[in-house]
Amino acid sequence: MFQYFFETKDTIEKGVGFEHFDLTHMFWLVLAVVLTVVGCIVYKKLDEKGRRTFRRVLAALIVADELYKIIGLLAIGKYTAGYLPLHLCSINIFIIAIHAIKPYRVLENFLYTVCIPSSLAALLMPNWTQLPLLNFMHIHSSTVHILLLLYPLILTLCGDMRPRLRYLPGSLGLLLGLAIPIYGVNEWLGKNFMFLSNPGGVAPLVFFEKLWGNHLYGFPVLIAAIVAVMYTPWLIMDFVQKKRKKCVE
């Protein structure tokens, strides 16, 4: 049962993993929904001190999950440069840790605009399907992305995180500021952190590469689409509230 527990995507044999939206995949998706609902119920009942503790505990669990991966890979001698925390979701771990200590507005917007869609996309379209449920990297990849989604989603749903368009340029500037040096790291190490070197099997990026010959041209389009989806509901709510105020006056 545990014969594949310490295997990785690079070492495991074919045919022992799972498929998108099969029972294994649905288990993690349902768990993410349940934890979000429970987390929101608990968070709403807490006072400000309790909410601060909740955020820091959740951030600590995310960091601990990443350390579990690193220590596990080092212990079995399978840690390579490809596991450096330079993928977008890994970077979000550090952003969340900083935000839990000092909640800067730009970081809030970054977590809302970048962390929620990226972690949700990873959960809906996982790239660790080669690994079975009883595998330490499968468990890590699933749980860390759930936790990465929970932090900004719970804070947003409970009103402690309110995205603002005026902070969007700073958030996108932070994303670009991270992407530039990581692109250099990819060239140096021959890796594909943040999918900057190749599409990595990600459907929209594969489409852009076929369409334009280079998937990087699609990033502005993809970012614009994500921003539109993430911010349109807030803009509509603001518009409705302003209309209501005018009617009352």
Image: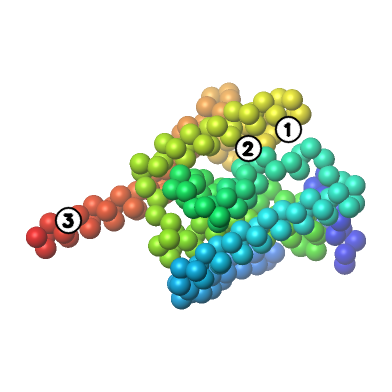
Q: Front-most of 115 and 178?
A: 178
Q: Which residue is mark 2?
A: 194
Q: Amino acid at mark 1?
A: Lys
Q: Which residue is mark 3?
A: 243
| Image quadrant containing the C terminus | bottom left
Identify the image quadrant of residue 19.
bottom right
Q: Residue 42, image x and y in percent?
A: 51, 74
Taking the image as drawn, is residue 109 in sight? no
Q: Which residue is mark 1?
A: 191
Residue 155 shown left or right of residue 83 in the figure: left
Residue name at image x 50 percent, y 69 percent: 49
Way the structure is coloured: rainbow
| Image quadrant containing the N terminus | bottom right
Residue 214 shown left or right of residue 110 in the figure: right
Q: Amino acid at mark 2?
A: Met
Residue name at image x 73 percent, y 32 percent: 191
Residue name at image x 55 percent, y 56 percent: 100
Residue 50 shown left or right of residue 88 in the figure: left
Taking the image as drawn, is residue 2 in sight? yes
Instruction: Kindly state the secondary structure of the residue where label 3 is placed.
Output: helix
Instruction: Point out the tag, 3 or 2, that comes first from the N-terminus.
Output: 2
Mark 2 and mark 1 residues within 8 Å of each other at the beta carbon: no
The residues tagged by marks 3 and 1 sit, at their Cα atoms, a distance apart of 51 Å
Q: Residue furthest left?
A: 249
Mark 3 and mark 1 residues within 8 Å of each other at the beta carbon: no
**Res. 150 mark:** none
